[in-house]
Amino acid sequence: MDVTRHRQATGECCCGVAQAGARSIDEILAAARARLRRLDPEQAHLAVRAGAVLVDIRPAAQRAATGAVPGALAVERNVLEWRFDPRSASRLPIADRYDLPVILFCHEGHSSSLAAAALHDLGLHRATDIVGGFVAWHRAGLPVFGPTALLPSSRTATPQTARRAFT
């Protein structure tokens, strides 16, 4: 057995042995995705047209470098739970109920799966993500702006800016 297979079989890595119960990121991602009804880009586009909230969780620099989806709410991953928890004082005005259909996307659909599972943990049982993320959306020929110049960080969704957008 080669070293790599031995390490995988025993949980050992270059940093030592993983603690009991530790899971790999691939295991965590698979568990998160098992809880979701993920959408392909076309299904997501139709769901948005029917009223679902499309949320881009990529950092501003990545949106500027690769483009953005028209109508998507930009809520960076590091504040997502606070913006969508209906009990949070920092929630977006649109996030006022647990049955809100929320569709997240990141660049390729990995971190958005983890983020959608986190929204499930908050009780937003209709949260999901797009298989393949922004890359798949773009390849499907769905609407995209950009790339563009980097916008000031004040252009991302805060409770105040989102309130103006939805009133």
Image (cartoon, rainbow, N blue to C red):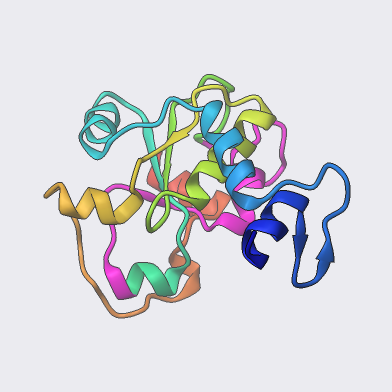
Residue 75 visible (yes or no): yes
Q: Name which residue lies at 44% across and 69% down.
A: 60
Q: Name which residue lies at 36% across and 29% down.
A: 52
Outermost front residue:
1
Q: Is residue 20 left or right of residue 26?
A: right
Screen quadrant of the C terminus: top left
On the image, the x and y values in percent for residue 118 come to: 64, 38
**164 above or below 107?**
above
Q: Nearer the viewer, residue 28 or 131?
A: 28
On the image, the x and y values in percent for residue 150 come to: 36, 78
Residue 130 highlighted magenta (yes or no): no
Q: Quadrant of residue 130?
A: top left
Q: Nearer the viewer, residue 104 or 21?
A: 21
Q: Name which residue lies at 39% across and 47% down.
A: 165
Q: Nearer the viewer, residue 28 or 56?
A: 28
Outermost right residue:
20
Residue 78 highlighted magenta (yes or no): yes
Q: Is residue 34 left or right of residue 140?
A: right
**68 above or below 147?**
above
Screen quadrant of the N terminus: bottom right
Q: Quadrant of residue 37?
A: top left
On the image, the x and y values in percent for residue 138 come to: 20, 54
Q: Is residue 127 left or right of residue 64?
A: right
On the image, the x and y values in percent for residue 79 come to: 63, 54
Residue 143 visible (yes or no): no
Q: Which residues are drawn in magenta?
A: 65-93
Outermost left residue:
141
**28 above or below 120?**
below
**166 above or below 123?**
below
Q: Quadrant of residue 107?
A: bottom left
Q: Is residue 83 left or right of residue 128?
A: right
